[in-house]
Image: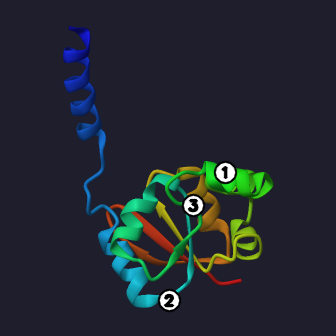
C-alpha cells in the first residue's frame, strides 16, 4: 500500500518542479536563426539538452542526455566543464573556445557564479536574454 501513496506523490512532485516545456524555445530559435549551422553551444546544465535540441537541431551541444558520457570520454574535460559552470574559472571564454570549441554559451538565470564570471570576461558578449536564458557569444 505505501507504493500506491508514494508513486502519485512522486509524479506530482516531478511535474510541479519541472520547467515548462517551452523554457528554452525562444533562446533556441534565436540560436538557430543567428548562428551558423553546426556551431557548438556550451551549456551550463546538461539536463537543458532535451529542450535545446527539441527546438534547435542545427547546432551541437557540449553535453547531452547524460554527463557521464563526457566524463567517460575525457574526465579532465568533464572536470573543466564543471568548474566553468560553477564559476570557478576566472575568464571562461578562453577555455570554452580552446578546450570545447564553443562559439556560444547558453545559461539559465540561476547560475550566479558563472554569470558573475561571464560579465567580467571581455571574451564573452551577451547577445540574447529572455526570462529563462542568456546567450553569450565567445568573441576571443
The spot of residue 12 in percent (x, y) is 21, 32
Q: Residues within 10 Å of mark 3 (few under 14, many from 20)?
A: many
The spot of residue 85 in percent (x, y) is 62, 55
Q: Is residue 31 above or below residue 106?
A: below
**Residue occupying the point 25% across, 18% down:** 6
Q: Which residue is mark 3?
A: 63
How many angstroms separate mark 1 from mark 3 (CA)? 11 Å
Q: Residues within 10 Å of mark 2 (few under 14, many from 20)?
A: some
Q: Which residue is mark 1?
A: 82
Q: Are marks 1 and 2 in contact (CB under 8 Å)?
A: no
**Residue occupying the point 37% across, 73% down:** 27
- The quarter of the picture where the C terminus appears is bottom right
Q: Nearer the viewer, residue 49 or 137?
A: 49
- In this rendering, position of residue 20 left or right of residue 136: left
Q: Mark 1 or mark 2: which is in front?
A: 2
Q: Nearer the viewer, residue 51 or 7?
A: 7
- The quarter of the picture where the N terminus appears is top left
Q: Secondary structure at mark 1?
A: helix
Disc assigned to residue 92: none
Disc assigned to residue 37: 2
The spot of residue 87 in percent (x, y) is 65, 53
Q: Earlier in the sequence, mark 2 or mark 3?
A: 2
**Residue occupying the point 24% across, 23% down:** 7
Q: Mark 1 or mark 3: which is in front?
A: 3
Amino acid at each position: 500500500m505505501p507504493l500506491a501513496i508514494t508513486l502519485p506523490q512522486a509524479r506530482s512532485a516531478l511535474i510541479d518542479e519541472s520547467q515548462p516545456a517551452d523554457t528554452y524555445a525562444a533562446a533556441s530559435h534565436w540560436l538557430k536563426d543567428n548562428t551558423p549551422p553546426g556551431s557548438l553551444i556550451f551549456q551550463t546544465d546538461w539536463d537543458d539538452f532535451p529542450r535545446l535540441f527539441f527546438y534547435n537541431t542545427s547546432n551541437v551541444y557540449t553535453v547531452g542526455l547524460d554527463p557521464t558520457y563526457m566524463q567517460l570520454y575525457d574526465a579532465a574535460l568533464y572536470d573543466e566543464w564543471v568548474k566553468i559552470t560553477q564559476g570557478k574559472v576566472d575568464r571562461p571564454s578562453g577555455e570554452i573556445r580552446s578546450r570545447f570549441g564553443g562559439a556560444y554559451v547558453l545559461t539559465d538565470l540561476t547560475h550566479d557564479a558563472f554569470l558573475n564570471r561571464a560579465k567580467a570576461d571581455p571574451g564573452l558578449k551577451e547577445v540574447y536574454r529572455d526570462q529563462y536564458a542568456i546567450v553569450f557569444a565567445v568573441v576571443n
